[in-house]
Image: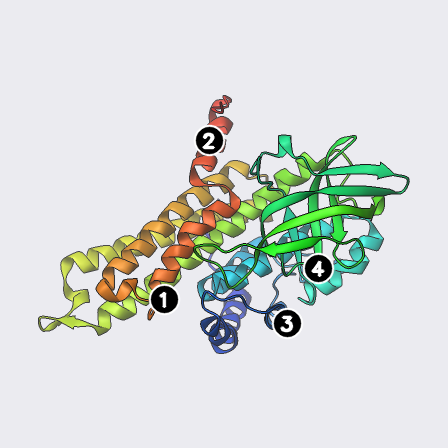
Amino acid sequence: MTYRVPTEEQTLAVESFRKFLLAEVRPVTHTYRDRFIPKATMRELTQRIAEFGLPGCTVPVEHGGMGWSYTTQGMLFEELAACSCDVALCVMLNMGLAAMLPGAAPELRERYLPEMLAGRIFGTIGIRELEIGSNVTEITTRAVRDGDHFMVNGTKTGITHGVYSDVFVCAVRTEKGLSHLLIDREAHGYETRNVGKIALNAQSTAQIVIADARVPATHLIGEEGEGLNTMKEFGEHARTHLGVLSVGLMRAALDESIAYVTQHAQFGKVIAARQLIAAKIADMAIRTDAGRLLLQRMLGMMDAGLRCDVQASIAMAFAAEAAVQVCRDAVQLHGANGVTRELDVERLLREAMAVPILGGTPEIQQLAIARALTGVAAFD
């Protein structure tokens, strides 16, 4: 895939979104640094963000979206990630559901999609369970057929956006195999409990408990028993978004570092004039740009309607590892100030360490890449 220069429309969309984020979103996220943003406050932010095309950027116009390209979505999402990883994760989950709902039953789509595109309701997707992690072949959450409904029971853990969620696309095991059901918190019921982490605590990561939820069969996302195919497509999109999150973190760390080394002096010179400092800044820029280019390649493939499972794993594995290194370098460049809560770089490093866990560690991506290339599964 060749690199394409951003169009005038893309450039204008990104610039206006960046100005909005700096003026309206960053002050809120600064106030709630490492503290949970109340749902009402997060809803206000997501409704404003929706006006700029997220999460509806790639949703077809006939379904209420913008009908824009995945490449444009990636450019906008990088801006959001560079501003706030916590808010970006909330929007990311709605982006994932917005991509799934156009293929759902019309009544399901008409009920939930407009509200989701407007940022008025929150959705999440649940696969992970305590004993099995993300091993979908061993999912224990059950959905037992009861006439025109399913009775759902199970517990999911580490679910991003969980406490915020109004609806929950839950990976379940039915009589026909792995499936996905959309569970409405108010109509069908589920309980959530927030989980503290080393980072990303301004948004919700939760345990979700579903006990005897009676869910209509019309709330299936995709065909019953075809959940693995749905999950593969969603996983490709999720790895893309998480890769862009990593690029956003690198960009934020690089921007903070450039500002610091050009403003602070030692021994009569700004520290940017020192060769080791200059080399580190250059390495940070190289990693950031390389990660962005890998993501742009796969976004271009998605725009062309091509599957890009391997490219998604390559992009995420590289960007995730690069983000940890870049953010670590940022802390080091700031010296003693870098480990204080006064500056953002220590938070960026914690976030860079946490992001890969959400969508599969670099090691998991390596195994997926090698299996695709060799045809041999290196799993025990």
Mark 1 vs 3, N-terminal side: 3
Q: Position of residue 222 (x, y in %)?
A: 75, 41
The furthest residue to the bottom: 23
Query: Dot 2 corresponds to which residue?
Result: 367
Q: Position of residue 68 (x, y in %)?
A: 62, 59
Callout 2: few (<14), some (14-19), or many (20+) C-alpha neighbours within 10 Å? some
Disc 2, SS: helix
Callout 4: few (<14), some (14-19), or many (20+) C-alpha neighbours within 10 Å? many
Marks 4 and 1: CB-CB under 8 Å? Answer: no
| Amino acid of disc 4 | Asp
153 displayed left or right of 367: right
CA–CA distance in space, label 2 to label 4: 35 Å
Disc 4, SS: loop
Say which residue appears at 36% left-offset and 66% top-offset.
344
Query: Dot 3 corresponds to which residue?
Result: 40
Mark 3 vs 4, N-terminal side: 3
Query: Dot 4 corresponds to which residue?
Result: 166
Q: Position of residue 168 (x, y in %)?
A: 70, 52
Marks 1 and 3: CB-CB under 8 Å? Answer: no
| Amino acid of disc 1 | Asp
| Amino acid of disc 2 | Leu
| Amino acid of disc 3 | Ala
Mark 4 vs 1, N-terminal side: 4
Query: Dot 1 corresponds to which residue?
Result: 344
Callout 1: few (<14), some (14-19), or many (20+) C-alpha neighbours within 10 Å? some
